[in-house]
Amino acid sequence: MSASVGDMLTRRAGETPDAPFLLAPEGTALSYAQVAARADALAGWLAAQDIKPGDSVAWAMPNSPQSALCILGILRGGYLATAINLVAGRDIIAYVLDHSDARLVFVTDETEPLLREALAQSGSQARVVNANACPALDAEPVSPEEGSASNAGQRVGAETDALLMYTSGTTGRPKGVTLTHRALLAGGENPAAAHALTPKDRALCTLPLYHINGLCVTIMGPLVSGGSVVLPPKFSVQRFWPLIREHGATWFSVVPTQISYLLHDETPFEPIPSLRFGRSASAPLSPDVQTAFETRFGVPIIETMGLTETAAQILSNPLPPGTRKVGSPGVAVGNEVMIADKAQVECTRGTEGEVLVRGPNVMRCYRNNPDATAEALTPDGWLRTGDLGRMDADGYVTITGRLKELIIKGGENIAPREVDEALYTHPDVIEAAAFACPCDRYGQRIEAGVMLTDGSQATEDVLIAVCVERIGKFKAPDRVHVFPELPKGPSGKIQRIKLAALVLEG
């Protein structure tokens, strides 16, 4: 096993230098040798900018071969690749730039205005570099000898911190998940093992690379298996099947929301001979939706489960003809999974408890948050996921609920408090609480209840607009309900579950 992501890239470039790795939708392909040369060039360029190994270097870019190159170059040089979620909203992006101590952030023409707004709001001194103006990220393919080789990768070991990716928690502020090179490689090896990936396989990347599924499953998975990946800028229902057909893709990884969009699209579909399977992750997949999708398209969907804290996949159903249990994300692959009671003692099969994970893919820590790290990681290395579930006699896990109050919309974790705090910025809001409601398209949608000052003229549209400005459209509530008072428990804490029940009951 290679010690670092850079080592793995060097190995692939040595073994199969001309094999394609990163493909643009229009057909431009970069070979493993070209990608390795360009990653070396970027590592050397960053060193020349006085960026030190271990420093945070962020990227805020839509998907493309260039953005994947950017990430691989940062990793190759031993820097901390810091993901900027482009739909997080200006406030959260400003927080991430501050909290990560980012020295430099790569942008594109499309994302530069948002990043400059966030920087103006933050205290960060990060330098903004447009990737199109960086000579080491030139869009044109290069031969290996053109890369300005850097020795930085030789300093990088398996336990070197590699990725900093922020995930929402119940406290409202996102937590910075720190993953080592060992974890990132394991994050690629686990889906490669579960799905029997080979150098002949080609993925269609439908999820942003600032999403752990997009990065570890559809970039690291092909890297460790010697395959390739097509990188359109974003998911498109209209282009999804044509891209798979045009590029001979053999698999894809999506979230249930995307499955729903594809299922509801009425465009006629013809079978695609190259396509082996699709995988679903990041949120529970409705059994009815899975069955309907497979019936219509004839493509088996492999339900899986993963977390940012575990470099994506922890559970997976087997490929056909193995037993796929609809409604379950499967069995442990490449790590251990245990259902445990409140004392972190393993439960008997069939008993509900918390889902715990242990393995090389588990995060090292939450950045600058020792309390949250201690709460999440047990002394013997188990990660507490906050999910409730049961394990059957065959080792298949069924998720039954959550210990935490996260809202999972389209595979993205959203802390209710983020929405609360955005609502509280309106001067008429006295009390605010966001909660999840069932949604056929996203799995869950966001709604909120508020108590307003007497005589307030604030409308639902105004309050939603406040949230859109503060935290972005994706995290803004779909509905805001006005109550004379929000339900509370004995301690005075607002009861989100009771509030959601009140709304659902009408």
Image (tube, rainbow, N blue to C red):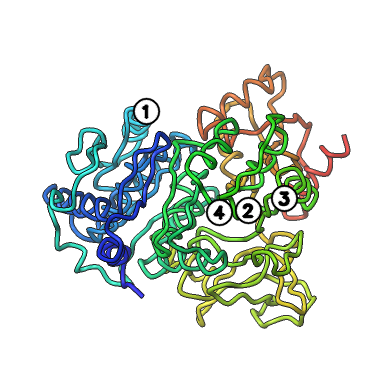
Q: Quadrant of residue 124?
A: top left
Residue at the (67%, 83%) spot, across then down: 345
On residue 110, the disc is 1
On residue 169, the disc is 4
Which callout, 4 or 1, points at the residue further toward the start of the chain?
1
In the image, taking residue 403 as reference, residue 194 lies left or right, namely: left
Between marks 3 and 1, how big is the CA–CA gap?
45 Å
Which callout, 2 or 3, points at the residue further toward the start of the chain?
2
Residue at the (72%, 23%) spot, across then down: 454
In the picture, the quarter occupied by the C terminus is top right
> Circle 2 is placed at which residue position?
280
Between marks 2 and 3, how big is the CA–CA gap?
40 Å
**Crowdedness near tag 3: few (<14), some (14–19) or many (≥20) residues, C-alpha within 10 Å:** few
- Where disc 4 sits, the SS reads loop
In the picture, the quarter occupied by the N terminus is bottom left
> Circle 3 is placed at which residue position?
492
In the image, taking residue 460 as reference, residue 5 lies left or right, namely: left
Residue type at numbered disc 4: Gly
Residue 338 at what x, y percent from top left? 64, 77
Which callout, 4 or 2, points at the residue further toward the start of the chain?
4
Q: Are marks 4 and 2 in contact (CB under 8 Å)?
A: no
In the rendered image, is residue 491 in sight? yes
In the image, taking residue 448 as reference, residue 191 lies left or right, namely: left
Residue type at numbered disc 1: Glu
Residue 248 at what x, y percent from top left? 50, 46
Q: Is residue 485 above or below residue 157?
A: above
Q: Are marks 3 and 1 in contact (CB under 8 Å)?
A: no
Residue 282 at what x, y percent from top left? 60, 53
Which callout, 3 or 1, points at the residue further toward the start of the chain?
1
In the image, taking residue 252 as reference, residue 97 lies left or right, namely: left
Residue 40 at what x, y percent from top left? 20, 55
Q: Of discs 3 and 1, which sits in the foreground?
A: 1
